[in-house]
Image (cartoon, rainbow, N blue to C red):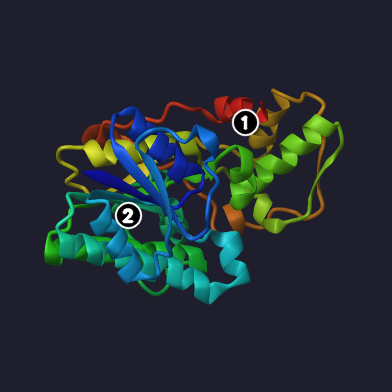
Amino acid sequence: MTILVTGAGAIGMKTAELLLACGKTVIVADVRPVDLGEQKPDGLSFEVCDILDRQALDALVSAYKVDEIVHTAALLSTAIRLDPPKGVLVNTVGTANILEIARQRGLRRVVIASSTTVGYTAFASHDNSPIEEDLALRIVSQRPASIYAATKIAAEHLALVYHDLYGVDVVVLRYGAVLSGGAGLATSVPGRLLATLLAAGEARREAVIDDPFLVWDGREEFVDMRDCAEANVAALHADRPGSRVYNIATGEWYSFDQFCDAVRAIYPDLRVRLKIPPTGGFAGFPYLRPAPSDIRLAADELGFKAKYSLHKTIEDYAK
């Protein structure tokens, strides 16, 4: 049997790599063709498929005898701001298509990539204890503060309802702010910040921050995309994922200055100039994070613990 990974981004491709190392047969599906080159590993296939085309997606699942899916395909905040309706379709309807195929075909398990941004609007009322998965969230006054967060919380609820009504074995992973290397640097808010700082440090020039989404008050948590991939694999293999929703993070959090200092460990002469002051929490959200996420459930039920600290992540990607 085969595992389908949707999305050929950094997390999706790393997940495929880890699954291949476990001896699995993997197919990666993305809306755009990807050149895997001549080094394509045995057991890996790639197909161009739009997750909004449920008929084509179902045909793919049938043809490859897929029995598990890791669903990472999504539009991130930067892309959604350019085309909000497309973001809603991809992130919500695309997830619904995955779940419906899993229901109709009785797949063994589906892992859904989500985000800790689903709970950011609860920060104003949360105490300073680690933020649990089942946090209290008022449905109107604490509604999502971005379209991206709205699509992710909708996808989470769809996943849980498909489990409750139809018995679909689904696990939802809430990644912290994801950091990746290579082409993945420019695809997310934290990636854009890291790319800006690393480029300035390497060129020995001043890093000018003029985007309000790239600076924050308080502290924020970050997670290496390699840890996200490890969490995906752990979620596929977990025997009893009873909680169904898990925070994927390191348990550590950092101010903007501490983030810059982590880059200075590589480029000591890095200078940073803010053209705009921070006006709230991370990525333009209105409230400051009161604590890092609680990561105990992922450890207890998935057997997952993050390996990469912020400093290690930055050191590796600077290379």
Residue 110 image position (x, y, % from top left): 26, 52
The residue carrying mark 1 is 317
The mark tally for this picture is 2
Residue 82 image position (x, y, % from top left): 63, 70
The C terminus appears in which quarter of the rendering? top right
Q: Residue at x 75, y 54 (%)?
A: 277
Counting other residues with Cα less than 10 Å from the Cα at mark 2, is it few (<14), some (14-19), or many (20 or more)? few
Image position of 207 (left or right of 182):
right
SS type, badge 2:
loop
Question: Identity of the amino acid at label 1?
Answer: Tyr
Q: Residue at x 79, y 30 (%)?
A: 202
Image position of 19 (left or right of 47):
left
Are the residues at dot 2 and dot 1 in contact (C-beta closer than 8 Å)? no
Residue 270 image position (x, y, % from top left): 80, 31
- In three-dimensional space, the C-alpha distance between marks 2 and 1, rounded to whole angstroms, equals 33 Å
* Residue closest to the far front: 38
Among numbered discs 2 and 1, the one appearing first in the sequence:
2
In front of the other: 129 or 132:
132
SS type, badge 1:
helix
The mark closer to the camera, 2 or 1, is 1
In front of the other: 113 or 147:
113
For residue 291, say whether it is visible: no
User: Which numbered circle lies on residue 135?
Assistant: 2
Examine the rendered structure and indicate whether residue 13 appears above or below residue 252.
below
Counting other residues with Cα less than 10 Å from the Cα at mark 1, is it few (<14), some (14-19), or many (20 or more)? some
Image position of 169 (left or right of 252):
left
In front of the other: 13 or 294:
13
Corner quadrant of residue 276: bottom right
Question: Identity of the amino acid at label 2?
Answer: Leu
User: Which numbered circle lies on residue 275?
Assistant: none
Residue 187 image position (x, y, % from top left): 60, 51
Q: Residue at x 52, y 41 (%)?
A: 36
